[in-house]
Amino acid sequence: MADRLTVARPYAKAAFARAQADGRLGAWSGALARAALAVSDERVRGLFGSPRVTAAQLADLVSDVAGAELDQHGRNFIALLAENGRLPFLPEIARIFDQFKDDAERVVDVSITSAAPLGPDERSKLVAALEKRFSRKVRVEADVDPALIGGAVVRAGDLTIDGSIRARLTRLAQELTA
Amino acid sequence: MSIKASEISDLIGRRIQNFAGGTEARNVGSVMSVADGVVRIHGLADARYGEMLEFPGNLFGLALNLERDSVGAVVLGEYKSIREGDAVKTTGRILEVPVGPELLGRVVDALGNPVDGKGPINAKISAPIERVAPGVIYRKSVSQPIQTGYKAVDSMVPVGRGQRELIIGDRQTGKTAMAIDTIINQKDSGVKCVYVAIGQKASTIANVVRKLEEHDALKHTIVVVASAATPAALQYISAYSGVTMGEYFMDNGEDALIVYDDLSKQAVAYRQISLLLKRPPGREAFPGDVFYLHSRLLERSARVNEQYVEMVTKGRVKGKTGSLTGLPIIETQAGDVTAFVPTNVISITDGQIFLESSLFNAGIRPAMNAGISVSRVGGAAQTDIIKRLGGGIRLALAQYRELAAFSQFASDLDEATRKQLERGQRTTEVMKQKQYAPMSVAQMALSIYAVNSGYMDNVPLGKVVAFEAAMQGFATSSHKAELDAINAEPVLKKHEATLKKIVENFVATGTY
């Protein structure tokens, strides 16, 4: 079976190109997120593959949940997904769409886990440093984990910057036992 | 409880001082699935092909499949501690093994860790296991012989330093014995040996190590072990680890010999990895790159010129050539050399020694089939005396084979034919040789001279082996100086008279 992401990627790419051309990235993102939520619902899931529901009916259902932000292009997109039986892939499509959107708007999602809650001053310093490092705007999601002992761990996509005391101790332990 | 030398507080203090703290920024992915030693990792977009990946608990893996959204990797070692969701980091390095003279006399695993209980190996340097073979301009043609110590091999299929000679045959035909004897025969030649045991029983490997030790051959040998119980990933890389260790000697202007025992098992281990990584199977379910698997390995056996050695050692070693002779072993199934892996390796190597179970069971040991065994480049490296005398052997055996089949139908034979048959039978007898009894060039020359010149024609067939043994004993006890002279300068013209004298003395006085 092909990877779910592999199936979702061309749809997301096409949707993104349309949205960008129309200048409605924000609206599409919101609509896709709601549509993704809808198809993740147990009750909606039960309708997929049911012989009593047509593809058009499914498309209407999902489009209605996605809301008024969805324009004619958006409705067409959902209808196409329904026709191809790819509605269950909406969560992946929404995720990839958001990645494309972040790339286009030069924004990066960063999660910061620190041993103690960050003060406003520390936070702004850290954000400034990270914005410089990634040369992008940073959207921060902060978290606290006392197990780190001290310092902080920054995660952005695949990149992890580990400046915690715990990581240093682990490396020291490895160094000494090597 | 034992305390290690590295636990002295001064040393610990120094290591703490030198410890580079600070933050580390690394590419991290997460484990999606673990099965049969193969891990799928999400993320890790920066991973490179063949790069080492770090798993929690000081475990390492090898990135072998780079796909759009995931990375497929094999775990080097025990994979049971890896869980779904574990963080995997890139290291930016490719796998390295320790190399150097410190490894001689040791038994190591595929990663170069000692497994012989003789303490740590203090190798000063390490080298990456994958390397491109020396290029055309750095090569030199094969011109020096490597003595296997077998009459049959050295006279008919000579192996030169830097050559790749395949040993191929069914199970139980003496393939390993031939390789081990060759290693034992390098005791005084200064050739360093590497024996790579891939997918074998641990008991067999222990036997080999013990035999090497008994014959004082372990001190110039590195044994790389990936037994049948080790994960397929380690069996696959062990051949590359071994060749890396052998290359060190070649690069330093020395001569080395590497035995891969055996490459069929390595191919099977690689097939397992490939299938688990979902690479498409081809012929015999092997992946598309088995040929490259072996060709890139065997290409690293080479003879390199002085410039190469000087360049690699940065001028430390001058005016010396280096060589790495390869003796890959392939096990066939019921003599079928047309299977995928045997044909591949036959075409890669510079010749092959065919061992046959029918000959082995008929008591002809080494069970070499002289008709289809060849050495494509070794002739240039043969010593003069063996080259001149060995030509007769090949001819006698070829004619014998032709007549032997024919004579089964004819009841009475003419004199010439009968003579030819008898000579062939005696030559076959003389080519027999016991295990762990390698011969010097002079000893071989003596035996071959005796049979070629017809001194054994009157010896009953059943007595030929005894005749030869007694003659060798006689020569070593009463003509040692002459034998040494032949070994020192193996030229037929100079010593033909000496050989004649020794044989005639023996025929006149000796008993057998």
Image (cartoon, rainbow, N blue to C red):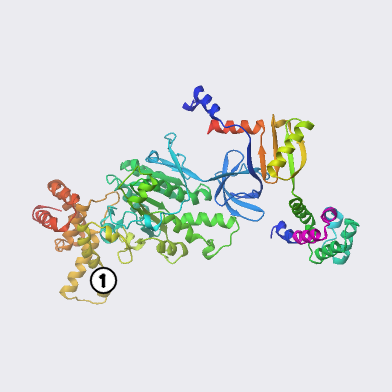
Secondary structure, magenta segment, majority class: helix
Crowd tier of the residue under label 1, counting other residues whose Cα lies within 10 Å: few below 14, some 14–19, many 20 or above: some
Please, what is the three-letter code of the amino acid marked with disc 1? Ala
x and y percentages locating residue B122 in the rendered image: 43, 35
Q: Where A154 falls versus A21 (above or below)? A: above
Q: Report the magenta residues as a range.
A: A11-30
Report the residue marked by disc 1: B404
Please give left or right for residue B56 compared with residue B463 in the image: right
Quarter of the view holding residue B156: bottom left
x and y percentages locating residue B246 in the rendered image: 39, 47
- Residue A54 seen in the figure: no
Q: Residue at x 30, y 64 (%)?
A: B370
Q: Is residue A90 magenta?
A: no
In which chain is the residue bearing label 1?
A: B
- Residue A43 seen in the figure: yes
Quarter of the view holding residue B396: bottom left
x and y percentages locating residue B384 in the rendered image: 21, 58
Question: Dot 1: what SS?
Answer: helix
Q: Where B105 falls versus B428 (above or below)? A: above
Please give left or right for residue B452 compared with residue B192 in the image: left
Q: Is residue A28 magenta?
A: yes
- In this view, the residue in front, B153 or B42, is B42
How many numbered markers are drawn?
Answer: 1
x and y percentages locating residue A98 in the rendered image: 77, 52
- In this view, the residue in front, B248 or A30, is A30
